Image (cartoon, helix red, strand yellow):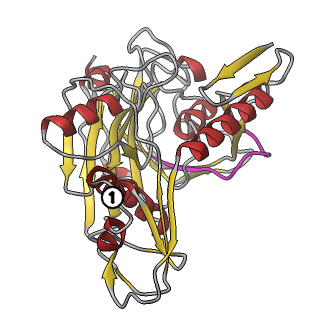
Amino acid sequence: MYKINNSNYTIWTFINTTNYEKFFIYILFVIIIRMKAATIIDLIVNSDVHTQSINHIIKQQHISQRMRRRLRNDGIITVNDKFATWNMLIHGGDHLVMKLTPEQEFSLSPMELDIIYEDEYILVINKAAGILMHPTSTIRDHTLANGVLHYYQETNQYYDFHPVHRLDKDTSGIVIIAKTSVVQHAFDKKHTHFYKSYDAIVEGHLPAVPISINWPIGRKPGSIIERCCTGQGKPARTDITIISKNTSKISSGKINSDDVITMNNNSNVCSTDNSLTSYNQFTHVRCLLHTGRTHQIRVHLSQLGYPLAGDDLYGGHLESIQRQALHAARVSFYHPITNEWLELHAEMPEDMNVLLND
């Protein structure tokens, strides 16, 4: 038997519980702690008030300037159960609710950040492989969160770390970070659709035709980490375009739009090559995601018979590269605050490029 400790809670669990039960207990623990720590302002505006700003109303509650700054930058604000902004005018009888999540207790770690785009609302970074998104129970420093918070301090910005999406530690590429929880909430509220494509290097030579994979993905039985293609999984679609093979560039003009291989639930790839798993031959592919399942590209390509180079979890080999050769290269979306259409790109890193030049 073991326990998870916090200053306010102790949760007991048992060795003979399943991994799923342990995971559920951990999630429940996190939810309880966040509920305990959240600050909530909930008030009905005096009926004598005609029109006032939220800032003025909050000042009347004798809240410190520091707390007001946090509420302005990170608060989730609703007026009469509708999403509101700090500058909104409110009236007598309005129901004002402001929620504030706990301050992030991350240390600051100097880090060279490859910034692709930045404005007052979002920060977009080309994350290097080998960098965790945020601290864990065992690794507290030198994650992307630590580096971003250090960057904010160095540039006199008073923001927190609110990733809009995440990348695995060993996947490089584009990460979008909202500077406040309000902006992060705006992404969710507007159901922002992201057009994402990844560069990947697979082992073996794929046939030079586009491939569309429609294989459901679910948890691998007995594992809380691995995924697999299964009829009981959630729908997952990945479109694959071949870019090059080791040294010979493939001309996109030779590919007829009618020559698309569609891989449905029980399809098997029809390869024109015999080198399905030759890990000294590589193909550069571009993967367009239509869904966002965990490990989707890694699982689909492995099931296809062409695992990512370096992805030893799903059948790849480590002889040529020490991490999965996967890079979040492109993302396009409408900015949730300005409504500007953004198209962002991050070049493929050298450790992947070198596989194609050997």
- Circle 1 sits in a helix, a strand or a loop, which is it? strand
On the image, the x and y values in percent for residue 187 come to 42, 61
Q: Of 198 and 149, which appears nearest the observer? A: 149
Left or right side of 240 for 12: right
Which range of residues does the magenta coloring cover? 229-240
Image quarter of the N terminus: top right
Quarter of the rendering containing residue 193 = bottom left
Q: Furthest-left residue in view? A: 155
Please indicate, yes or no, whether residue 232 appears anywhere in the rendered image: yes
What residue is drawn where x is 41% and y is 14%? 322
On the image, the x and y values in percent for residue 8 come to 63, 31
Q: Of 46 and 277, which appears nearest the observer? A: 46
Vertical placement of 115 versus 220: above or below?
below
**Residue 235 colored in magenta in the image:** yes
Left or right side of 165 for 300: right
Please indicate, yes or no, whether residue 285 appears anywhere in the rendered image: no
Q: In the rendered image, which residue does mark 1 sit on?
A: 332
On the image, the x and y values in percent for residue 78 come to 48, 71
Vertical placement of 2 versus 36: above or below?
above
Q: Of 47 and 83, which appears nearest the observer? A: 47
For disc 1, the neighbor class at 10 Å (few under 14, some 14 to 19, many from 20) is some
Looking at the rendered structure, the kind of residue marked 1 is: Ser
On the image, the x and y values in percent for residue 266 come to 74, 44
What residue is drawn where x is 78% and y is 45%? 231
Image quarter of the C terminus: top left
Quarter of the rendering containing residue 53 = bottom left
**Residue 84 colored in magenta in the image:** no
